[in-house]
Amino acid sequence: MAETVIPLADFRYSATVPSVPLALSAPTGLLSDRLDRPLRDLRISVTDRCNFRCSYCMPKEVFDRHYSFLPQQSLLSFEEITRVARLFVAHGVQKIRLTGGEPLLRKRIEVLIGQLSALRTPAGEPLDLTLTTNGSLLARQAQALKDNGLQRVTVSLDALDDAIFRRMNDADFPVANVLAGIDEAARVGLGAIKVNMVLQRGVNDDQIVPMARHFRDHLGGAAILRFIEYMDVGATNGWRMDQVLPSAQVIARLQEHFPLEPVGANRLGETAARWRYADGAGEIGVISSVTEAFCQDCNRARLSTEGKLFLCLFAHQGHDLRTLLRGPFSDEQIAGTIGLIWQGRDDRYSELRSGMAAPTGSDSTRRVEMHYIGG
Ligand code: SAM
């Protein structure tokens, strides 16, 4: 019988304190990395805690009551997050996504949203401010999030069938509450809502058609369902390639029920390939993170819960910005440091993955976990 090895090493401190440049120039909003990719999208993890225990993300065997989550003083404060976000925006970031862990578990998250929604791009435009949630607390919080300036939400939902959903979240959480959260988000105007479904072959692939049918016919197209290939993130989920259901097969299965036509990308760096129902009932997306890597136009940076900057979801090493934020450094110095880090970036793990041996042992244990770095 195959055995899944679950390493218990702590990955959280794999970050170096970056050097602050001596010669400083003001951010231009036109930063690009070594592969000519601009910096446009910042994902901020606001907590490493989650109330779900999805086996592919935070398996119960590892994240149990003995697991030490980050202490409160390690987390970036709202003021620190807003300060560093402002510097990223000066460098060209136009979109900020709050994530985690489960971001709605962070106390008074709406206050942070209020602070971030006041930021403006160098051209004076508001940010595209969004949040990714498991939806469990959304029905209660949607109105406050909207009132404080959140524009959109993405809700993760892996099954419509209650028994499958409860099994997958491994917290016995009913699907009806997430669906109520999506309805409430639509009602208060947090649209267009994206619903992200991570697919694992043999676990929830029988939910593809029911999920598509539900979101086609429900909410008058206010929610866009996106199917995501299960990725080899982190080191605790025992990922195997044979668990991945390629997006091409998802489209083929859907075509048997609902004819689909491809739609062009909305913008550079968009992760999902878009398809629309030929009968006009809205659209879906597929995110082929494994079978068709999209590193060539990846414009995303990720800030961990404790202020470490990661340049790739699959990075082994972060850059400790919190030490700078809590040290005697000016905004100009920290902005200069961020600029240098981005200019040195050449990560493209997903494109290289196919030519690499599957990570095992110490190699896989160096990967950062998704709940820490933010999904
Ligand atoms: N708690 C929030 C949520 O559920 O959306 C935000 C954090 S969660 C880590 C963000 C997203 O990452 C979720 O949609 C989750 O399904 C996805 N995710 C986690 N592990 C993944 C993996 N190995 N492959 C693909 N997606 C994954």
Image (tube, rainbow, N blue to C red):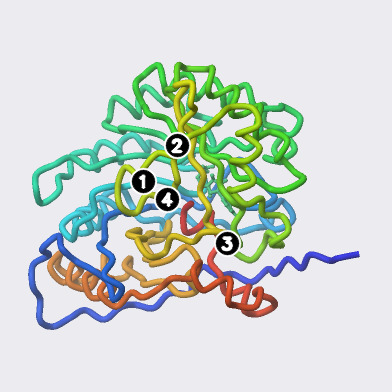
Label drawn at residue 154: 2
How far apart, in angstroms, are the residues tagged by discs 1 and 3? 19 Å
- In primary-sequence order, the first of circles 1 and 3 is 1
SS at mark 3? Answer: loop
Mark 1: C-beta under 8 Å from nearest atom of ligand 1: no
How far apart, in angstroms, are the residues tagged by discs 1 and 2? 9 Å
**Position in image of residue 157 (x %, y %):** 58, 35
Mark 3: C-beta under 8 Å from nearest atom of ligand 1: yes
- CA neighbours of label 1 inside 10 A, class few (<14), some (14 to 19), many (20+): many
Mark 4: C-beta under 8 Å from nearest atom of ligand 1: no
Mark 4 or 2: the one toward you: 4
Label drawn at residue 214: none
SS at mark 2? Answer: strand
How far apart, in angstroms, are the residues tagged by discs 3 and 4? 16 Å
Q: Left or right? Give the position of 193 relative to 171.
A: left
SS at mark 1? Answer: strand
Mark 2: C-beta under 8 Å from nearest atom of ligand 1: yes
> Circle 1 is placed at which residue position?
97
- CA neighbours of label 2 inside 10 A, class few (<14), some (14 to 19), many (20+): many
Looking at the picture, tell me which residue is in the foreground, 98 or 228: 228
Residue type, label 1: Arg
**Position in image of residue 125 (x %, y %):** 14, 41
- In primary-sequence order, the first of circles 4 and 2 is 2
